[in-house]
Amino acid sequence: MSEKLEKIIKEVEEMSVLELNELVKAFEEKFGVSATAVAGPAVALGPVEEEKSTANVELTDAGANKIAIIKIVKEVLALGLKEAKDLVDAAPSMLKTDMKKEEAEALKKQVEDAGGKVTLK
């Protein structure tokens, strides 16, 4: 495969669903073709919702190892020890709202690895 095609494929892989939808529409208008006619009706997705780039992180259960969870919350959210302890003790509690999706996933993994339970909303 040529370098030019590899670059295009890499760009397409990194697009959101909304961007891909816009790209398909642009191709349909520019070249007078229909992606549905070529791919078949099973590919038609209907309305496309934009993927959220943020998440709310809720601690649903601190588990048996509260001290480890408190340390993680204190470190990741840059809180004092008392504030972090209060959040963990009050579970279920909202740890952070509108956190970047990648950071929220990382926090969730850390808490779950330490024995706690987290819900992303």
Image: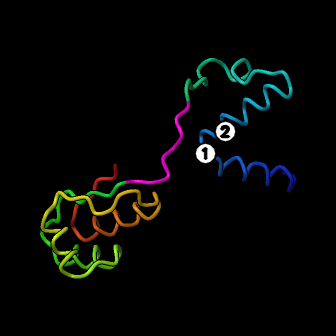
Q: In the image, residue 71 lies at what x, y percent? A: 25, 79
Disc 2: CA contacts within 10 A as few (<14), some (14-19) or many (>=20): some
Q: Residue furthest bottom?
A: 81
Depicted 77 relative to depicted 2: above or below = below
Q: In the image, residue 67 lies at what x, y percent? A: 17, 78
Please tell me whether mark 2 sits on a helix, a strand or a loop. helix
Depicted 68 relative to depicted 104: above or below = below
Q: Main secondary structure of the magenta part?
A: loop
Is 118 or 93 nearer to us in this picture?
93
| Residue holding disc 2 | 20
Residues rendered magenta in the picture: 48-55
Q: In the image, residue 106 lies at what x, y percent? A: 40, 66
Residue shown at the point (74%, 48%) measured from the top left:
9
Q: CA distance from mark 2 to mark 1?
A: 6 Å
Q: Which mark is residue 46?
A: none
Identify the amino acid type marked 1.
Ser
Identify the amino acid type marked 2.
Leu
Q: In the image, residue 45 lies at what x, y percent? A: 57, 26
Depicted 69 relative to depicted 21: above or below = below
The quadrant in which residue 108 appears is bottom left
| Residue holding disc 1 | 16
Residue shown at the point (32%, 58%) measured from the top left:
57
Question: How many circles with numbers are drawn on the protein?
Answer: 2
Q: Are marks 2 and 1 in contact (CB under 8 Å)?
A: yes
Disc 1: CA contacts within 10 A as few (<14), some (14-19) or many (>=20): few
